[in-house]
Image (spheres, rainbow, N blue to C red):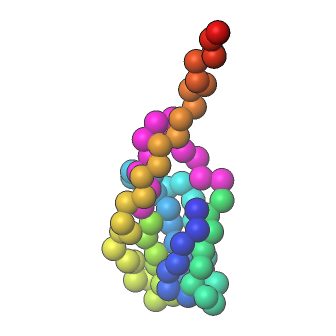
Amino acid sequence: MTGVAEAGSRVELFRGDVSVGTAVTGESGVFTVSGVALVSGANVLNAKSTDAAGNVSASSTALKITQDTVAPAAPSF
């Protein structure tokens, strides 16, 4: 997951109320959170950032992802 926040801030990514990863933004404000654990089905992710002074942002707009882990039916002839 990649996004943008205030440069030098800590970004925490949430699936519902569960923290699923953190990152620190670089000078450009870009952050990347790798290895985000998604559940099968609907996932709603939000992020919050905390600046160097400890101020916490409002939650980001929700990102909705559906993870389909069910194989399709076998083809038939």
- Number of marks present in the image shown: 0
Q: Position of residue 60 (x, y in %)?
A: 38, 69
In the image, the segment drawn in magenta is 35-46
* Residue 8 in view of the camera: no
Residue 75 in which image quadrant: top right
Q: Is residue 26 above or below residue 60?
A: below
Residue 16 in the figure: left or right of residue 6: left
Q: Quadrant of the C terminus?
A: top right
In the image, what residue occupies the spot 66% across and 59% down?
34
Spot occupied by residue 45 in the image (x, y as percentages of width and height): 44, 56
- Residue that appears at 62% across and 11% down: 76
For residue 72, say whether it is visible: yes
Residue 47 is left or right of residue 75, and the answer is left
Give 48 or 52, whichever is nearer the viewer.
Answer: 48
Q: Quadrant of the N terminus?
A: bottom right
Which of 46/68 is in front? 68
